[in-house]
Image (tube, rainbow, N blue to C red):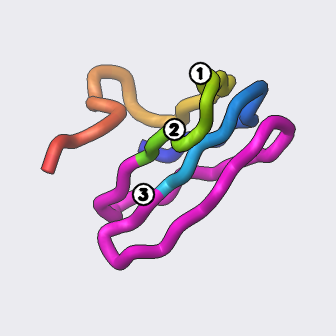
Amino acid sequence: MINAGVMLKGQLTEVTEAGKRLHLKAGDSIVEVVNTWHYGKNEGDEPAELIVFYAGVKGTPISVLK
């Protein structure tokens, strides 16, 4: 399900199955990849806070485990 958001504080790294990395810090915006296996991890010293908006169909999961 497609989503978009803004990092409020902290930092986050998004990693795709192909090894691409996107490093985010407070103030950065993100449109998350879809239909591609990926994960995010906090490599910083403080909790990451994001505000995220999802656009999808009610009842459809927002993520699928591999």
Split into 4 quadrants, where in the image is the N terminus?
top left
Amino acid type assigned to the residue bearing label 1 in the image: Pro
Vertical relation: 1 (above or below) 33: above
Residue in the picture at 39% in, 75% down: 19
Label 1, on which residue?
A: 47
Residue in the picture at 51% in, 38% down: 42
Q: Are marks 1 and 2 in contact (CB under 8 Å)?
A: yes
Label 2, on which residue?
A: 42
Amino acid type assigned to the residue bearing label 2 in the image: Asn
Q: Nearer the viewer, residue 49 or 43?
A: 43
CA distance separating discs 3 and 2: 20 Å
Q: Earlier in the sequence, mark 1 or mark 2?
A: 2
Q: Is residue 42 magenta?
A: no
CA distance separating discs 1 and 2: 7 Å
Q: Which residues are magenta?
A: 15-39
Q: Position of residue 30 (x, y in %)?
A: 68, 49
